[in-house]
Amino acid sequence: MKEVKCVIWDLDNTLWDGTLLEGDEIKLKPGILDILHTLDSRGILLSIASRNNHNHAMAKLKEFGIDHYFVYPEIGWNAKSHSIAEIQENLNIGMDTLLFIDDQEFEAEEVKSTHPQVTIVLAHEYQQLTSMKRLIPKVITEESRRRRFMFIQDQKRKEDEQSFVGPSGEFLASLNMIFTISTAREEDLLRAEELTIRTNQLNSTGIQYSFDELKKFLHSPQHHLWVCDLSDKYGSYGKIGLALVEVKDNSWHIRLLLMSCRIVSRGVGTVMLSLLMKEAKMEGKLLTAEFLRNERNRQMLMTYKFANFKEKQRVGDKILFENDLTIIQEYPQYIQVVVDGIHYSQEV
Amino acid sequence: MNRTEVYNQIRDFIIKNMEAFNDGEDLADSDNIFEKGFVSSIFAIRLLHFIESKFDIEVSDEMIVLENFSSVDNIANLVKQLKGRNTHAN
């Protein structure tokens, strides 16, 4: 079972006692503040799926001083299954990483029938949330603690993008994106480990590496381990990607390439591959890559194929790619690429 | 859907969704889109979703190769080929 990335709360008689619409006296359930704080500090996102008047409910949350905890709250009159689908789409995380908590069997069943992958917890069990194994991440990093802020920045980005008039290229350029790739240092390894656990869509193998394994690669002369981060005018996305390359006699072999799902819409997966291709070519090496196909990494497969990687061998789900490095895409104009402190820009 | 419609749909999608065509640049059916501008991974997956849902086909891993997507001509050929295969199977 996957770690839970987001807990979606019902409000009436789940987060608080009482029914807001009926004018009850509303009180937070005992211990709720602690639970919210604990989950948030573990990097688990919190959201809401509630049938209520949106403004009224938000005002109540504000009154309790907890409104800031929730990202993409869905408060209105839609079916809960619909609300959950909206939240999932906005967060761009797997259905099987969502947990929904509600006091009504009916709501639980309705969600279950549409999204069988969502974990359901009934409200009377709320105090057990913080001790559930899937809600205790194996790794907690600076990035996980800041996760909520990053999603809030993201919400602002999306709003601005929607209200931006003019070509989307101009919008992308207006973000002042800087994509930085650097040789990993020991302090990056915890986050690197976390990325191998949490990343599915843009992941070339899905193999999880522990801190100690990654540390070995860091000190091995036969390996390069890179981490990348992305920032724009709204702030930093933090460390969002990883590349592990094995150096062979006449080739570089990409053992792992992954990019966080948060930055999928920025198209930087291709930038990372372009970089590896350029570097390998400069070193006079061939470039090969290991790929484990699963039901979730089709986009990564496309990223490789569109970067002109050819299948050299395929055994079951295991693919060996090779690239002769004759066609290498330039970095897009709207993004500045910094490699180990050196700036590359497409500006003329 | 006839041949012209297939071509028009593909051309429209590319022009609307690739940064390189924001300035109203022309796209000939034989133009290599990878030479026209940066093809991002997000554009690639959207293009794939588009042709699969629009033309009701499924593109297998083996068919996902650069050449099959490099121009309007090649994408249209891919669609034709997969459509033909489906009809055959029925």
Image: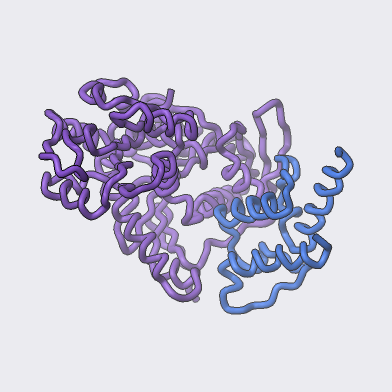
Chain colours: A purple, B blue
- Residue B40 as seen in the image, left or right of residue A313: left
Between residue A31 and residue A172, name the one nearer to us. Answer: A31
The quadrant in which the N terminus of chain A is found is top left
Quarter-wise, where is residue B11 in the image? Answer: bottom right
Residue A138, can we see it? no
Residue A161 location in percent, x, y? 41, 65
- Residue A142 as seen in the image, left or right of residue A300: left
Residue A129 location in percent, x, y? 26, 25
Give the residue displayed 34% in from the left and 24% down from the top. A134
- Residue A82 as seen in the image, left or right of residue A326: left
Residue A52 location in percent, x, y? 27, 46
Give the residue displayed 12% in from the left and 44% down from the top. A64
Quarter-wise, where is residue A69 in the image? Answer: top left
Quarter-wise, where is residue A185 in the image? Answer: top left
- Residue B10 as seen in the image, left or right of residue A191: right
Residue A76 location in percent, x, y? 33, 49
Give the residue displayed 32% in from the left and 29% down from the top. A104
Between residue A151 and residue A293, name the one nearer to us. Answer: A151
Q: Is A289 located above or below residue B67 in the figure?
A: above
Q: Is A19 located above or below residue A156 in the figure?
A: above
